[in-house]
Amino acid sequence: MVSLYLYDGSFDGLLTAIFECFADRRQPQDIVSQDTYQASLLDELRPVTTDINKAERVIAGIDARSDGRGGELVYQLFLSEQPGIELRIYRLVHLLMRRNDPGILDNFADPDVLYCAQIQKMIRREVHRMHAFVRFQKATNDVFYAVISPDFNVIPLIGDHFQRRYADQSWVIFDSARYYGLFYDLNDLSFIDGDSDIFQQASSNPIGRAELEGQEDQYQTLWKQYFSSVTIQERRNIKLHLRHMPRRYWKYLVEKQVVDRKR
Amino acid sequence: MNRTLEKLTILSDAAKYDASCSSSGSKRANQNKGLGNSDGMGICHSYTEDGRCVSLLKILFTNHCIYDCAYCVSRRSNDVRRAAFTVEEVVDLTINFYRRNYIEGLFLSSGIFKDADYTMERLVRVAKTLRQQHNFNGYIHLKAIPGASPELLHEAGLYADRLSVNIEIPSEMSLKKVAPEKNYPDIIQPMNYLSDEKERYADEKKHLRKTPLFLPAGQSTQLIVGASPESDLQILHLADDLYKQQRLKRVYYSGYVPIATDNRVPDIKAPPLVRENRVYQADWLLRFYQFSVDEIVDEKHPNLDLEVDPKVSYALRNPEKFPVDINKADYEMILRVPGIGVKSAMKIVKSRLYQRLNLDHLQRMGVVVKRAKFFITCPGIQERHKDYETTHLRQLILAGDTAARLSPQLSLFG
């Protein structure tokens, strides 16, 4: 029989499941989200009810044993959506609890630590890319809209940066693949889904892409022109260009859309 | 609009030969719910098709110029279209590009029209308008115009995150030849002035918390490589002095792009990109790898080896210092191993506290094993590497690089 911890797919749910593993004093065979679980007669199921208190105790325990680094790391790993990440997270928590030595997170010769560090690096790179590649378009309601479809679920990790930077403009960043996003209304930052009113308030927005604010097209044209005229032809190096800006990110980059020839 | 587009085309094209596009190292937070901040690491918002980072709106205020420097597209005697922005146009472009998350800020340079102060005053006015009328806290890099008055430089330092005076030609003798109207003192004096002022403000800050920011991201400069006969030894010594004496944050190197035939500069077919790359690698060794100039180039070898990078070159010239024992050597020595970078070196010294490291561990940590294997010892390393003669080793390394170039499968998925 296989002991399977079944959680609701939320981060708090996963932390609760890890709490229960420790409480049960057993190693889970796997921790699986209800959404992805495929029933099998051989499984011994252990459903978990999400409990915020238990989740917070787990985070407090990790942070106390890792100089405060572990909680953030575990959250980032969770957002990576990698298959089997739940068990990886459990093993990392187990390692931190067992060793009680923050330095263990720097032992890159340990395969679990190394794996987690590599995933974290990928997440951070994706966050950095979204800081770079978000392109706002100003709509008729003075809200700046942007659409992204990142490799990982980084929406919860990028709000702070944009709120600090664009404190005096209202904006929306929407993840079209996961169908949710962020909305900043000049005061507060909140999560929204694709059915939010904010997409109807503007007569157009990048998701509908009808007409935008009067000068929007002009600034896009200026930006495209700038982008093409700063290239030094004698130094063209498309391989390097692609390494920095892989094709899958192009669809939301103004400057990589074909220049309109009718001008 | 069409007029702005035309100006932008001319004045960004003329600005593109400035290699600097850095937007990091400043400390300006968003204040009073304004626009922007520049207190994090720099962000490259896009990349040109030559693979360079686009972080700032990099433009000239004007490409009219009273000077006739041979290496420069905007030189007086060159027949190019000329244009000049107004202060309002630059401000409007910066704000609107910034609001759309295209850029981290503005890099404003200029040809010299009328005189140094007249030009500098325009640049300062752009920065002042952005800061004071638009509460703009994004990154601003201004050119310090050689010969501008201390009053204007001081004001520039209060609004800009970084100022730069480009030296361009790495010796006074060559400068006289290709840019007869310029002189070294006019270039070095503003640097020294700004460096002293920055220090004065830093001192004041210790006693008065409300001391305003002054050039939080410091100064930089650019040297053109290959437009004049200086050796890499001369170039690197100049850079080293600039880091130490003028406390520059960065020296940029620009392989000379042949922009027109002018018999004062060499007529070359293509920019010396390999040499430029090697000089950058050497600069990195100075700043992050604790090398001194004399360990990289010397009177006997005044130029960098174009075939292998300067770290390999160092290792080949100092065989008695290798192989390095991964499990015992100091951090400083591990940092000197070709194929091991700053991050891998840190990982090695932290991880080896917990266990003895072998070749497999190094591979997984990101060490470039095909390069490092000739210069280290650890479990998993074949001992025979120790006995290689220097010339043989050099051939092996070059052969390895050629093999990698001939089988491009891996890079397709990179």
Image: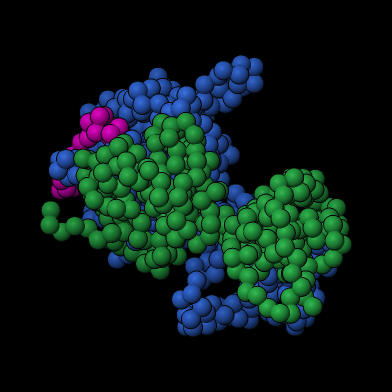
Displayed quadrant of residue A40: bottom right
* Picture layout, residue B138 above or below residue B362: above
Judged left or right of residue A225, residue A163 is right
How far across and how far down the image is residue B398, in percent? Answer: 55, 78
How far across and how far down the image is residue B223, in percent? Answer: 42, 48
Displayed quadrant of residue A18: bottom right
Name the residue located 47 percent from the left edge and 80 percent from the top edge: B408
Pick the front one: A81 or B219: A81
* Picture layout, residue A235 above or below residue B79: below
Name the residue located 21 percent from the left edge and 44 percent from the top edge: A218
* Residue B293 seen from this side: no
Name the residue located 33 percent from the left edge and 53 percent from the top edge: A207
Displayed quadrant of residue B136: top left
Stretch of the chain drawn in magenta: B74-92
Determine if the magenta segment contains residue B3. Answer: no
Name the residue located 35 percent from the left edge and 23 percent from the top edge: B133
**Residue sitting at the far front:** A41
Among the chains, which one is blue? B
